[in-house]
Image (cartoon, grey):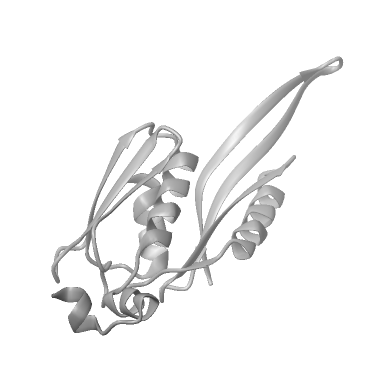
């Protein structure tokens, strides 16, 4: 499993004796073969927060349905005020995505995709919206199996 740090945030809490500084780190883990997870770790130091975030991400791993090296269909996912739109792309297009979306898609193993982020640009919300969108993906075979039909019946 490969790990990527998506965001490091320094947080300051004012207490009676002064300011208490801590860190929150957003980490994504993936195997490049359709599995990915995100986790948030909080601690008094960045390395500890990264360890907690990675452990949390490993607990939240999801399996993503891919069609070759792209996604099977368009998906529009929303988390709070963030909208992430993902569209499959032809071979040779590459990963056209920004910020946290690109990191997560690379960890999943997607090589050709078009994306657009609308609304809030908060990295945590973008990451969660991306994961929500990836969870919605289904191949034609999976849909046919769920409905008890053949792939030809579904596609016609």
Image label count = 0
Q: Quadrant of the C terminus?
A: bottom left
Residue 97 in view (yes/no): no
Q: Is residue 63 above or below residue 95?
A: below
Q: Is residue 31 left or right of residue 60?
A: left
Q: Residue at x 14, y 71 (%)?
A: 91
Residue 21's x, y, as percent? 72, 29
Q: Is residue 23 above or below residue 32?
A: above
Residue closer to the observer: 10 or 118: 118
Q: Which residue is painted at 66% across and 45% down in the image? A: 46
- Along the horizontal axis of the image, is 107 left or right of 91? right
Residue drawn at the location 47% of the way across and 73% of the way down: 31
On the rendered structure, is 105 left or right of 24?
left
Residue 131 place in picture, x, y as percent: 44, 55
Which x, y percent locates residue 15? 81, 18
Q: In x, y percent, where is residue 37?
A: 53, 61
Q: Is residue 92 above or below residue 53?
A: below
Q: Which is more toward the observer, 129 or 49?
A: 129
- Indicate the quadrant where residue 16 lies: top right
Q: Is any atom of residue 108 visible in this view?
A: yes
Q: Considering depth in this image, is 45 or 140 the residue closer to the camera?
A: 140
In the depicted structure, whether residue 7 falls above or below residue 133: above
Q: Is residue 44 left or right of residue 140?
A: right
């Amino acid at each position: 499993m490969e790990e990527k740090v998506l965001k490091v945030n320094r947080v300051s809490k004012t207490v009676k004796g002064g300011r208490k500084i801590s860190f929150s780190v957003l980490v994504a883990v993936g195997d490049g073969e359709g599995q990915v997870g995100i986790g948030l770790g909080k601690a008094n130091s960045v390395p500890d927060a990264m360890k907690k975030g990675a452990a949390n991400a490993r607990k939240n791993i999801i399996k993503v349905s891919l069609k070759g090296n792209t996604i099977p269909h368009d998906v529009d996912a929303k988390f709070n005020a963030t909208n992430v739109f993902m569209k499959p792309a032809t071979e040779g297009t590459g990963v056209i995505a920004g910020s946290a979306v690109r990191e997560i898609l690379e960890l999943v193993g997607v090589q050709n995709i078009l994306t657009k982020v609308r609304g809030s640009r908060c990295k945590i919300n973008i990451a969660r919206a991306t994961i929500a969108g990836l969870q919605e993906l289904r191949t034609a075979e999976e849909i046919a199996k769920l409905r008890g039909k053949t792939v030809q019946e579904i596609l016609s």
